[in-house]
Amino acid sequence: MPLWGPLLLPWVLGTVLAFLDGRRAWVAWLAIAGLAGTLVCTVWLLPQAWSAQAPQFVTGDWPVGVGIRLRADQLSIVFALVSTSVLLGTLVYEHVAGGITSRSFPALVVFMGAGLTGVFFTSDAFNFYVFFELAMTAAFGLASYGEKPRNLRAAFTFVVVNLMGSTLFLTAVVMLYLTTGTLDMLSIIAWGQAGEPFALLVPGTLLLCAFGVKLGFFPFHFWAPAVYRDAGPTVAALLAGALANIGSYGLLRFGVDVLPQVLEQARPLLEILGATSILYGSILALSRRDTREVLAYASISQAGLIIAALSLEGREGLCAAVALALAGSVDKTALFLAQDRGGERARRAYSVAAFSTAGVPPTAGFWSKAWLLRAALEQGHAWLAGLVVLASALSLLALFRAYQRERWLREGAALHRGTGAVVYALSLALIVVGLWPEPLLRAGRDAIQGLGTLP
């Protein structure tokens, strides 16, 4: 399978869907089939990505630096697989839950998939911004889905705050070009190794802020509670489970691979931001009474864990960051979808996802947090290990207090079989990975191998 397969398919399909009425069942199934095809094309790239030479090509056969380099290494593949799976599951859920109510919803979800796939597979800083904006533009449209006053309020907040993040990112890209004379990521890496590393400190700081807004860790979290509370559950699952991966991936790609000198200088700051986010999100989640706000602050705490993992030196911390991002993506999707309606399967899915978020075995979240604990203890950061344990206990308490308060979750009518299957499949995936963690652990290790600047 050539690299352009998973890149081109959602673009073409999204363009076709834009002219069709997404409220029709066959249009929704067409979008679902397209995302499934994108997922298959991405899976097909796995053997190539895990080979000695990752698949890549330069558009138009232009010289590197003029043409845009597209590349799929292990880090790109694992993030693309998880993000596309979240989009596919969420679209299926919305379609069978009672029908899509907006003609543009399937097209916007597919366009978000096109943007995310492009972000993960590009090796050009400006092209990263272009795909970044495609995904964000689709998210702006999705944020108002439902067209109720609270949905429109969530969309307005999301658009204003994330436009600020986009401005920061574009400014950083311009500064990178003015400093290095190139936008190709591999060329920027070579320039940083031969040039003055402190010259990249300012654009690196702007990138940290831009990705901080997308990921939603403290102090860039202020949009998350309002948006996750007022957006519909399906949209919240899309934003928290798929779109937020731009932040995680961007910090890993730019911080570890492209600008490792800046990451080294920023480690003390990342320790502070990570610890603050973990504690702040856990305490605020415990104090909220609205389930959607509880989930929002739990997401902030989860983002803090990823930042704390990035602050650790060596491979183990980075592997833990990848595992936390992948497991957290499924956790958040399951939590937001499960709290949408009642029913036995929804209750079980919510419980399993809550256990995974808190790091209780046997779930995927347990192994990702265990990896972080191991890395922290090996490097003598006992305070971080203690903070992770405390935050896990607080998150578990907050999520199950919300469960007990929500009578409609505990006693609601049964889900449609299709929606129940989606949330049940998500929870089952968390348990399967918890019982057989080797795929998650290998994905974390191998994804870091793709970052060529690591010793």
Image (tube, grey):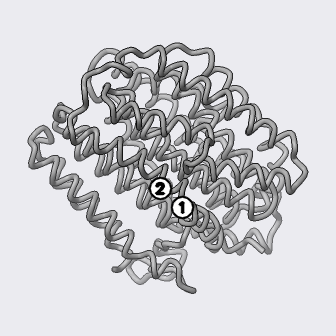
Asked if residue 144 lies left or right of residue 67, the reply is left
- What amino acid type is highlighted by mark number 2? Val
Name the residue that disc number 2 marks. 432
State the residue at coordinates (80%, 70%).
195
Dot 1, crowdedness within 10 Å: few (<14), some or many (≥20)? some
The image quadrant that residue 198 belongs to is bottom right
Front residue of 454 and 391: 391
Q: Decide: is 305 above or below 226.
A: below
The answer to whether mark 1 and mark 2 are in CB contact below 8 A is yes
Instruction: Determine the secondary structure under disc 1.
Output: loop
- Measuring from the top left, give residue 46's x and y in whole percent: 45, 75
State the residue at coordinates (57%, 66%).
438
State the residue at coordinates (55%, 42%).
356
Q: Please say whether residue 301 is visible from this viewpoint.
A: yes
- What amino acid type is highlighted by mark number 1? Trp
Asked if residue 352 lies left or right of residue 362, the reply is left
Instruction: Determine the secondary structure under disc 2.
Output: helix
Quarter of the picture containing the C terminus is bottom right
The image quadrant that residue 238 belongs to is top left
Name the residue that disc number 1 marks. 436
Q: Decide: is 263 above or below 408.
A: below
State the residue at coordinates (15%, 42%).
22
Q: Decide: is 333 above or below 129.
A: above
Quarter of the picture containing the N terminus is bottom left
The image quadrant that residue 287 belongs to is top right
